[in-house]
Structure formats: structure tokens, C-alpha cells
Image (cartoon, rainbow, N blue to C red):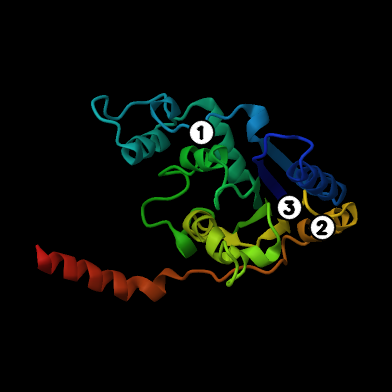
């Protein structure tokens, strides 16, 4: 397999760093190919604007999706973005490695998504969910959180981890066609013993070595929603 890890933590000695290092070593030892984009080490710019492009569709007004569609048609992305897009096409499995900050992904990773998941490259033209560009590929979030597991439950103060990750698993990864593997979550690595940390790493090794068969979250089938979409469109038209 070909695995692409997008790593989003600023400290190499962090637990996130340990997880990425372990994943790469274990996968390579098992005969897989691995590419890591360490966003902080790369000094990746998360701001999406005209700097994304070497082409210009409309110089008077920046309509992001229009410019992306044009750049996708005419090879108009700057080299640093094109390189990341090429990695997405290359991989069989995408892993996002990051800490949960403010119940979401770090800004540098969200900016990576904003710039790399572009119209014409990651979606567009009816290509989404089970008809998505990356259909047949898998993706997984590997994350750390600051608190104990009880805080991230249905009755916990932050709500369930499923709901926290829904915008990422559903709104990003599943939307562009990935089959989404159940997330690997490490709770409070700075609060637990070294033995517990080692146990997490052992379990993570098992997970990355079973990416082809690891359990996945519920997959959206667009056909289940086509009637609702059509009824909604007719209702909107009737109101005009």
C-alpha cells in the first residue's frame, strides 16, 4: 500500500510526533510506501487566496471555486500545492495526524484542506461522497485530545468524539470519496503513565498495519438522498 500522512503538530517530540514516527517505521518495515507531509516543518502557508494559482480566470473578483476549476483545467496551481495534490492521487490511504484544538483541527491542517481539496482536483461535477474523486481510497484521523475519554462521550462535557469529528470525517474525507476508517484517539497523553502511552503506541502499530481491513464509519450513499434533493429543489423553485 501507499500511505500519505499529513502531520500537523509543531513539536517533533510530542506524542503526535511519536505516532507519526512509529507509523512510518512500522509501515515501511512491512513493505509499504509512506510519504509524510510535516506541515509545520514545511512551513506550510494555510491562507487560501490568489497565491494558490499561476493562472487567472477573473482578475477583478476572486471567486475561489471558479479559479480552482480554471486552474485544474489548465495546470494552474503553484508547485507547492500541486505537489500535495499529487500525493493525494498517489496514496491508497490518507492519515491525518493532529491534536484536537478548540474541538477542531489545527488551523494549519484546515488551511491545507482549504488549499489542496480544490474544485476539479478533489470534487466538482457531481463527484462527491460515494461518487467522489477518491472513491476506492481510505482515510483515517489519528488524534490526541487533552482530557480523559469520559469528557468526550455522549454525557461528557465536550460531547461525543463522533460528533466532534463529524465535520472532518463526513464533511471533508467522506465528501471527496474516501472510505473513512474509525478514528484512532489517544486521550490525555500528557496526563497518563509511560506504560499507558506505550500501550497506545502498541495499539496504534496494530492499527496502521491493518489499514486495509480496519473498521469504517457509516458510508453515505447519495442515491438515498436524491428524492429529498429533488423535492427541495422543486420547493425552492415554487417559492420564486
Foreground tag (2 vs 3): 2
Q: Which mark is residue 1?
A: 3
Q: Nearer the viewer, residue 86 or 94?
A: 94
Q: Which mark is residue 206?
A: none
Farthest left residue in view: 240
Q: Earlier in the sequence, mark 1 or mark 3?
A: 3
Foreground tag (1 vs 2): 2
Farthest front residue in view: 157
Q: Nearer the viewer, residue 48 or 32?
A: 48
Q: Where residue 135 sits in the image (x, y, percent)? A: 54, 59
Dot 1 and dot 2 residues touching (CB under 8 Å): no
As drawn, 139 above or below 149: above
As drawn, 61 above or below 18: above
Q: Earlier in the sequence, mark 2 or mark 3?
A: 3
Give the total number of marks visible in the rendering: 3
What residue sits right under mark 2 in the picture?
Answer: 200
Dot 2 and dot 3 residues touching (CB under 8 Å): no
Q: Where residue 227 sits in the image (x, y, percent)? A: 30, 75
Q: Nearer the viewer, residue 191 or 85?
A: 191
What residue sits right under mark 1 in the picture?
Answer: 46
Q: Where residue 117 sits in the image (x, y, percent)? A: 48, 44
Label 3: few (<14), some or many (≥20) within 10 Å?
A: some
Query: Which residue is found at the position 84% from the left and 54% from the top?
Result: 197
Left of 93 or right of it: where is 114?
left
Label 2: few (<14), some or many (≥20) within 10 Å?
A: some
Disc 1 secondary structure class: loop
Distance from label 1 to label 3 (Cα)?
28 Å
Farthest right residue in view: 195
Distance from label 2 to label 3 (Cα)?
23 Å
Amino acid at each position: 500500500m501507499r500511505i500519505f500522512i499529513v502531520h500537523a503538530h509543531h513539536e517533533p517530540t510530542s506524542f503526535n510526533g511519536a505516532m507519526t514516527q512509529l507509523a512510518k517505521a512500522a509501515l515501511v518495515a512491512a513493505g509499504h510506501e509512506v510519504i509524510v507531509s510535516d506541515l509545520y516543518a514545511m512551513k506550510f502557508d494555510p491562507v487560501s487566496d490568489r497565491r494558490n494559482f499561476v493562472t487567472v480566470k477573473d482578475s477583478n473578483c476572486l471567486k475561489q471555486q471558479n479559479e480552482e476549476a480554471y486552474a485544474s483545467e489548465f495546470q494552474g496551481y503553484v508547485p507547492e500545492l500541486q505537489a500535495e495534490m499529487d500525493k493525494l492521487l498517489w496514496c491508497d490511504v490518507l492519515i491525518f495526524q493532529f491534536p484536537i484544538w478548540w474541538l477542531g483541527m489545527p488551523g494549519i491542517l484546515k488551511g491545507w484542506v482549504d488549499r489542496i481539496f480544490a474544485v476539479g482536483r478533489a470534487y466538482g461535477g457531481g463527484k462527491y461522497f460515494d461518487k467522489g474523486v477518491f472513491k476506492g481510497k481510505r482515510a483515517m484521523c489519528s488524534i490526541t485530545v487533552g482530557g480523559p475519554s469520559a469528557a468526550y462521550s455522549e454525557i461528557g462535557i465536550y460531547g461525543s468524539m463522533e460528533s466532534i469529528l463529524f465535520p472532518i470525517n463526513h464533511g471533508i474525507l467522506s465528501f471527496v470519496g474516501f472510505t473513512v476508517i474509525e478514528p484512532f484517539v489517544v486521550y490525555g497523553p500528557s496526563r497518563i503513565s509511560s506504560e499507558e502511552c506505550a500501550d497506545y503506541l502498541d495499539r496504534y502499530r496494530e492499527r496502521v498495519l491493518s489499514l486495509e481491513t480496519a473498521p469504517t464509519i457509516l458510508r453515505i450513499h447519495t442515491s438515498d438522498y436524491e428524492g429529498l434533493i429533488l423535492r427541495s429543489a422543486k420547493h425552492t423553485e415554487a417559492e420564486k
